[in-house]
Image (cartoon, rainbow, N blue to C red):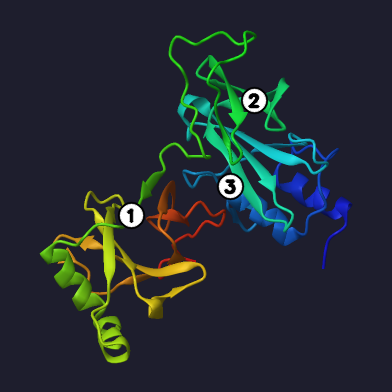
Amino acid sequence: MRQTLLTIVLFLASLAPHARADAMPTLSKTEARNLFLTAGFPLEGTQITNRCGKRANPGLTFADLNGDGAPEVAFVDAGPCYPGGHWISVLRRTPAGIWLPVFEAPGTAQPVAHRTNGWYDLKYTYRGASLILQYNGRAYAAAKQAHSAVSKPATPPPAPSDAVVPGRRDVLPADKPTSEQDAAVHRALEGDFADAQKVEHHALGYTVGEADLNDDGRPDLLIHLADSLWCGSSGCSGDVLMATASGYSTKAIDLPNFDSTIHILPATHGGMHDLRFDGAHYVFSWNGRSYH
């Protein structure tokens, strides 16, 4: 059941006292929680946390950046978690009510009186240097030429395209496994290999990539299966084999289906980095047993 606007205003205000309600869309409590999660501020109870897993108090501003009558939202947070002391996340809402990031970076940003592809340009500032961001159809990225109102910085700030999160690592598990990796995958996924042989009469196909998910200095093995039995409309199944001092774990961690890319986010829960897949908005966090 959808909440009234007043209820949502009070809910958001209790989470972020700086939220501006003059252009706030009507959101259910679940939608509001998903909004914070997508912006990189997961809620633990009613407590907001940041990418470092610490308490946060981001300010929210709702504004229609593309003139379609539906407001976008900008989160701005401050603290030692971020390079330069600030973080900004700008999100848009799809007709289906899903929030998607269009810009995420350390620093701050504000609209300027010029539009690109129907969206207001943003003046992005990081460590005292500024540049203009323009909407490229998917996300905000650095303009090829900044407007004269903004001086060219001596050291340009990072302006990631396609809403890249600083500190995020994008892994495409599309490599052929080494003999050591192949042996470990066969050992951990013995039942899957047996099923593929029994049902489809061929070896289970898969590719791999590497990323250190628990920051222990050992790259863990990311597995992407490539077989019709393990694939669907949202992609193909994935697994993780954690690296240990004595080799890869014999027990695999299941991942959701995905098409190609795993985004390893800076935030951690339970000692493991949060994950996103294929640019989707949902963040999967480790609960001590699985990613959910």
Choose between 228 and 107: the one closer to the eye: 228
Residue at 70% in and 47% down: 15
Looking at the picture, does residue 280 appear above or below residue 150? Answer: below
| Residue 104 sits in quarter | top right
Look at mark 3 in the image and give the residue it sits on.
41
Pointer 2: residues within 10 angstroms few (<14), some, or many (20+)?
many
Furthest-bottom residue in this view: 198
Is residue 26 something one can see in this rendering?
A: yes
Amino acid beneath label 3 = Phe
Q: Secondary structure at mark 2?
A: strand
Residue 193: x percent and y percent? Answer: 26, 82
The kind of residue on which mark 1 rests is Leu
Q: Residue at x 51, y 44 (%)?
A: 54
Amino acid on which disc 2 is placed: Leu
Q: Residues within 10 Å of mark 1 (few under 14, many from 20)?
A: many
Q: Position of residue 117 (x, y in %)?
A: 68, 32
Residue at which label 1 appears? 213
Residue tagged 2: 122
